[in-house]
Image (spheres, grey):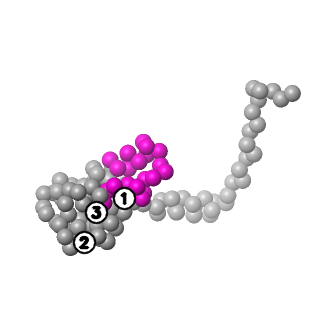
Amino acid sequence: MQDRNRIALPAPRPVGTAAETTAVLQRILATPSLAAQLLTAAADHLTKVHPDTELTIAGWGRALALADARVLTGYPQAVAQHAGRRAMAALSPEMWAGARTRGEWALCLRQIAGSV
């Protein structure tokens, strides 16, 4: 009879070499944050769909919704919300003041993505 109070511990994972660990850490650090990926995905959409027309509120909402679906699907709600908040907080109030084309917005979003 097995003892219900005792659980089987998983086998220890083999530890990689220092070079393997360094390579993994470099790859992780080189990956853009989820907020940056969200802004970049929105910029991709704005660049592909009528980049020479003025960006409307509806157009911005659609670009953001598509970026959200593309980047944040599969992450826990708290993680996705945090990434969305960080991305929106990175947008400066001056960006909203001037009327810009979708292509100009895309350039701004890509620039901001480098800082989040």
Q: Which disc number belongs to residue 51?
A: 2
The reply to whether discs 1 and 2 touch (Cβ–Cβ < 8 Å) is no
Which residue does the numbered mark 3 point to in the structure image?
Answer: 109
Left or right of 47 on screen, residue 20: right
* Mark with earlier residue (3, 2): 2
Q: Nearer the viewer, mark 1 or mark 3?
A: 1
Specify the quadrant that holds the N terminus.
top right
Left or right of 78 on screen, residue 19: right
Residue at (76, 37) in percent of width and height: 8
> Mark 3: which amino acid?
Leu
Characterize the local packing of mark 3: few (<14), some (14-19) or many (20 or more) Cα atoms within 10 angstroms: many
Compared with residue 81, is residue 102 higher up or lower down, i.e. above or below?
Answer: below
Q: Is residue 45 magenta?
A: no
In the rendering, at what x and y percent does residue 60 appear? 25, 58
Q: Which residues are magenta?
A: 63-85
Left or right of 56 on screen, residue 30: right
The Cα atoms of the two marked residues, 3 and 2, are separated by 13 Å
The Cα atoms of the two marked residues, 1 and 3, are separated by 12 Å
Residue at (75, 26) in percent of width and height: 5
The Cα atoms of the two marked residues, 1 and 2, are separated by 16 Å
Characterize the local packing of mark 1: few (<14), some (14-19) or many (20 or more) Cα atoms within 10 angstroms: many
The reply to whether discs 3 and 2 touch (Cβ–Cβ < 8 Å) is no
Q: Of 89 and 104, which appears nearest the observer?
A: 104
Q: Which disc number belongs to residue 67?
A: 1
Assign a secondary structure to mark 3: helix
Q: Magenta region's main secondary structure?
A: helix
* Mark with earlier residue (1, 3): 1
> Mark 1: which amino acid?
Ala
> Mark 2: which amino acid?
Pro
Specify the quadrant that holds the C terminus.
bottom left
